[in-house]
Image (cartoon, rainbow, N blue to C red):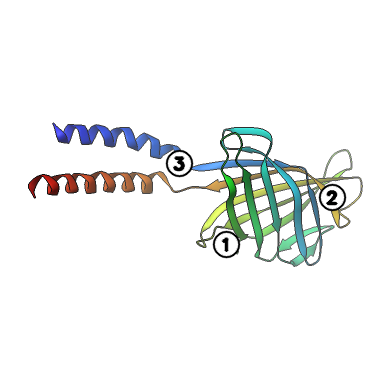
Amino acid sequence: MRRVVLLALLALALPLAAWADSIDVTNRGGTVTGGSSGLSLGGSVLTSYGAAVGTNLGSVTFSTGAFISGNAQMGGTLAPGGTFVITGNGTNGVPNGVIFSGTFSSSSPIMWTLTTLANGTHSYTLSGPINDASGRVGATTQITVNVGKGFFNGTAGLSSGDTNLAVPEPGTLGLLGTGLVGIAGLMRRKLRIG
């Protein structure tokens, strides 16, 4: 009977682990500033975190490394490093304090891409992977700035930002859950025998 109960608990725990894949984060507003030494974002407001949506759930800030090719006006590639921080304010189920902190990764280029739209306006997109505190790629981001008919001249308002935070993969969580159930079973057995 006990084995049946343990298998039932395990069967209930595994679907929960499958939900843990990634968390989408959206932000808008704030100002992107920079030049040849890199780019930074300040004043951007977190507007969604997973299923939570609101007008001010926290903030997103970043700074990049310097341009290693191209430039801020025409687009190019940025050096790894810098910082990327997402902070929650504890509303609508969003955690309070630093949710994610990392650095732009060298595993793939950090790109600042210029796009000329059909109406003649210019849009810039910053995209690339971000390492978390443990050094593994923990997020990817795409930040978009629209500057109108001119080019980026050192400062522009942020149009939108989308970041995808990686969370432990389902297999790892399932293995952890199975291990915890096994340890609990051994402890219970040892207490009953002893």
- Camera-side residue of 148 and 12: 12
**Comparing labels 1 and 3, the label whose residue is closer to the camera:** 3
The three-letter amino acid code for the residue at tag 2 is Ala
Circle count: 3
Give me the C-alpha separation between circle 2 and circle 1: 28 Å
x, y percent for residue 108: 60, 60
Which kind of residue does numbered mark 3 sit on?
Ala
Q: Which residue is mark 1?
A: 107
Q: Nearer the viewer, mark 2 or mark 1?
A: 2
Marks 1/3: CA–CA distance: 23 Å
Tell me if residue 110 comes above or below residue 4 in the rendering: below
Left or right relative to 89: residue 77? right
Give the class, few, some or many, for how many residues have Cα within 10 Å of label 1's Cα (few <14, many ≥20). few
**Numbered circle sitting on residue 20:** 3
Residue 185: x percent and y percent? Answer: 19, 44
> For residue 39, which numbered disc appears in the image?
none
- Indicate which disc residue 156 carries: 2
